[in-house]
Image (tube, rainbow, N blue to C red):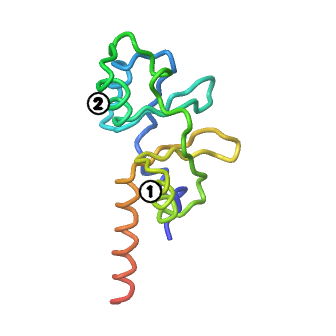
Amino acid sequence: MTLLRDLLSTQQPLVTVAPNATVREAAKKMASANVGSVAVMENERLAGIFTERDLLQRVLAEDLDLDATPIGAVMTKDVVTSEVDLGTGNAIHLMRRHNVRHLPVVSEAGSILGMFSIRDLLRAEMQDLRDYIARSEG
């Protein structure tokens, strides 16, 4: 079983913004890094998360100004997080239970260590399955 801890080194650098960043700034960072979410950080602490879904539902559907709207006003504040010792299968179940597509991983001290998308975790689960099949056949 693969733990989130095992996958952190394979992740690209975490993309972050401050709560006072504009929606356009966050969207540009997301596009540039080819990610679907940014961690919103306030004084080294995870204050929220801003995702493609937030952009669609809270900004575009509400006709908000991309250059005048701060991320802090439209981010998800009640963030579902995980610790590093959770297995990928359990992380997927956690995400499904809370209907989220991005899962920040935090240390015991509360600092953010990385961010996984549901796609990242499904890929890891598929690799575990391939490895299991290879061991069974060998």
Could you say which is closer to the camera, residue 73 or residue 7?
Answer: 73
Q: Residue furthest front?
A: 62
Could you say which is closer to the camera, residue 35 or residue 23?
Answer: 23
Which residue is under mark 2?
31
Q: Residue furthest top?
A: 68
Could you say which is closer to the camera, residue 73 or residue 41?
Answer: 73
Residue 58's quadrant in the figure? top left
Local crowd size for mark 1, using a 10 Å CA cut-off: few (<14), some (14–19), many (≥20): few
Could you say which is closer to the camera, residue 105 or residue 11?
Answer: 105
Q: Residue at x 38, y 10 (%)?
A: 68
**Distance between the alpha carbons at the discs numbered 1 and 2:** 25 Å
Which residue is under mark 1?
96
For residue 23, above or below residue 49? above
Q: Residue furthest right?
A: 109
Instruction: Give the label, 1 or 2, closer to the camera.
Output: 1
Local crowd size for mark 2, using a 10 Å CA cut-off: few (<14), some (14–19), many (≥20): few
Please state the horizontal and vertical placement of residue 110, each as a whole percent of the image: 66, 40
Residue 134's quadrant in the figure? bottom left
Residue 44: which disc? none
Please state the horizontal and vertical placement of residue 138, each as a whole percent of the image: 35, 89
Q: Residue at x 35, y 37 (%)?
A: 53
Q: Is residue 131 left or right of residue 93?
A: left
Identity, as a three-letter code, of the amino acid under mark 2: Ala
Q: Secondary structure at mark 1?
A: helix
